[in-house]
Amino acid sequence: MAKKTAVITGASGGIGKRFAETVERAGSFDEVWVIARRPERLEVLKNMVPFPVRVLALDLTDRASFDTYAALLESEQPEVGVLINCSGFGKFCATTDVPLSENLNMVDLNCQALMAMCQLTLPYMKSGGHIINIASVAAYQPIPYINVYAASKAFVLSYSRALAREVKKSGVSVCAVCPFWTKTEFFNRSVVTDKNGGTVVKKYVAMYTPEQIVDRAWRDALSGRDMSRYGFKAIAQGILTKLLPHSLVMNVWQSQQKLK
């Protein structure tokens, strides 16, 4: 009999870690596969997750990791009840001030890896399975100085909602989670200080917690919604960026953050 399995990428911290800690919201599992680059950060989850944990130390910016994951699926033949894609990172500065290699890695992780994990996992999912992909409110609009990150999350949102329609007939749901600013280690890598000590983002209009984002995401995903947003500001931003010209939205963003 196939093992009922949950798969979580980016599980070493922040939103991914919180999903791992609360995975019983999606049911009972024989095993939870947690994926990130740092195995020591994943090992601690064995004491926090209510099911057996398998640590998979994979760098999802390396395409060889997809072969490793595919081989594991082939050998184990699990029934994946839930796939949660939380791996990703951003950079807050001018696009040309980020090394090309880092911008390429950002696209590889935020877009390519997420798409690969979905495509490799779907054949092992049955009716009642759930895919949860972490997008962002940044997906709603072009954002100067957070350019590549915002564009990559627009891919996640569009891909996830379209995929939800494609797999609906099989009984699998796909939900794109669009958090507003969320207090995680994400900022340790994303915030870049210039030579004058300044940063791109000077004003955070709201800051939520992983607990708030994940609690809402579980409710929305398990009810079959294709998008999840937490907080009035996140919902309002989604509405306004649909109604207003993006040229105006970008002007407002640059004015708010005092960006020329």
Image (cartoon, grey):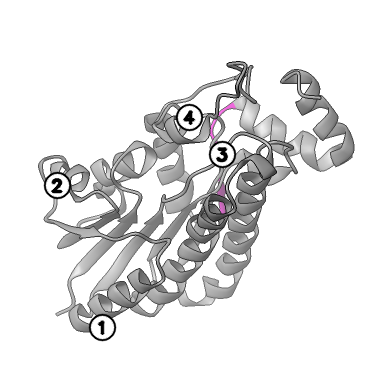
Is 4 in front, or is 111? 111
Residue at (53%, 29%) from the top-left corner? 191
Residue indicated by mark 3: 91
Report, in whole angstroms, how far the alpha carbon at label 3 lies from the one at label 4. 15 Å
Q: Nearer the viewer, mark 3 or mark 2?
A: 3
26 up-or-down from 234: above or below: below
Residue at (57%, 61%) from the top-left corner? 160
Name the amino acid, label 3. Answer: Lys
* CB within 8 Å, label 3 to label 4: no
Highlighted range, magenta: 226-231
Element carrying mark 2: helix
Q: Nearer the viewer, mark 1 or mark 3?
A: 3
Residue indicated by mark 4: 182
105 up-or-down from 45: above or below: below
Please indicate, yes or no, whether residue 46 appears anywhere in the rendered image: yes
Name which of mark 3 and mark 4 comes first in the sequence.
3
Q: Position of residue 101 (x, y in %)?
A: 54, 55
Report, in whole angstroms, how far the alpha carbon at label 1 lies from the one at label 3. 36 Å
Q: Position of residue 45 (x, y in %)?
A: 17, 44
Residue indicated by mark 1: 74
Name the amino acid, label 4. Answer: Thr
Residue indicated by mark 2: 43
The quadrant in which residue 218 appears is top left
Name which of mark 4 and mark 2 comes first in the sequence.
2
Left or right? Give the position of 186 relative to 71. Answer: right
The crowding category of the residue bearing disc 2, from other C-alpha atoms within 10 Å (few below 14, some 14 to 19, many at least 20), is: some
199 up-or-down from 131: above or below: above
